[in-house]
Amino acid sequence: AFKIFSLGKRPYHRLFSDVCQDINAQLDTLNLLIQPLLEAAPKYDFEGVEGNGIRSVLGVVDCILKELISHLQYCTDKHNSFFFNGTNCAAKLARFCALLSRLGKLLDIATLMHQHLGP
């Protein structure tokens, strides 16, 4: 999606390109924060029941990333359509970027809790 919109001349192309770069940076950060939580999640299971707060947070991350991928796929597939609203798609991506930033803070807190409290 970034390559498609980075070369465009319409006003929303610049916003789309900038937001995609921000999202890419956010995803790199999230990847670093998720790795320790993926390793820690099984340690908090209770008597073989695969369910705990860390798994719930990881489930939320999974849902958000699936929605982000779906929206990026829509933008990529429909960008040449007459009815494509690029400004709206760019604004939605900006909201995803803000959400990823907040999610990164949540994952950071979960990591700190795991490090200091332990299973």
Image: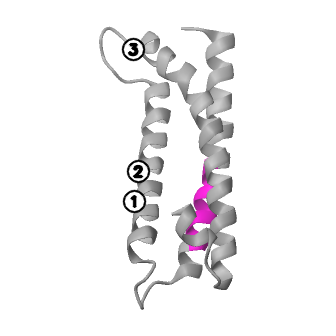
- Quadrant in the picture for residue 86: bottom right
> The residue tagged with tag 2: helix, strand or loop?
helix
Q: Is residue 30 above or below residue 114?
A: below
- Quadrant in the picture for residue 43: top left
Look at 54% across and 23% down and name the residue there.
35
Residue 66, numbered circle = 2
Residue 36 horizontal/vertical position (percent): 56, 19
| Nearest to the observer: residue 56 or residue 104 | 104
| Dot 1 or dot 3, earlier in sequence | 3
Q: Which residue is mark 3?
A: 45
Q: CA distance from mark 1 to mark 3?
A: 31 Å
Identify the amino acid type marked 1: Ser
For disc 1, the neighbor class at 10 Å (few under 14, some 14 to 19, many from 20) is: few
> In the image, which residues are magenta?
90-100
Identify the amino acid type marked 2: Lys
Q: Which residue is mark 1?
A: 70
Residue 63 horizontal/vertical position (percent): 42, 47
| Nearest to the observer: residue 38 or residue 48 | 38
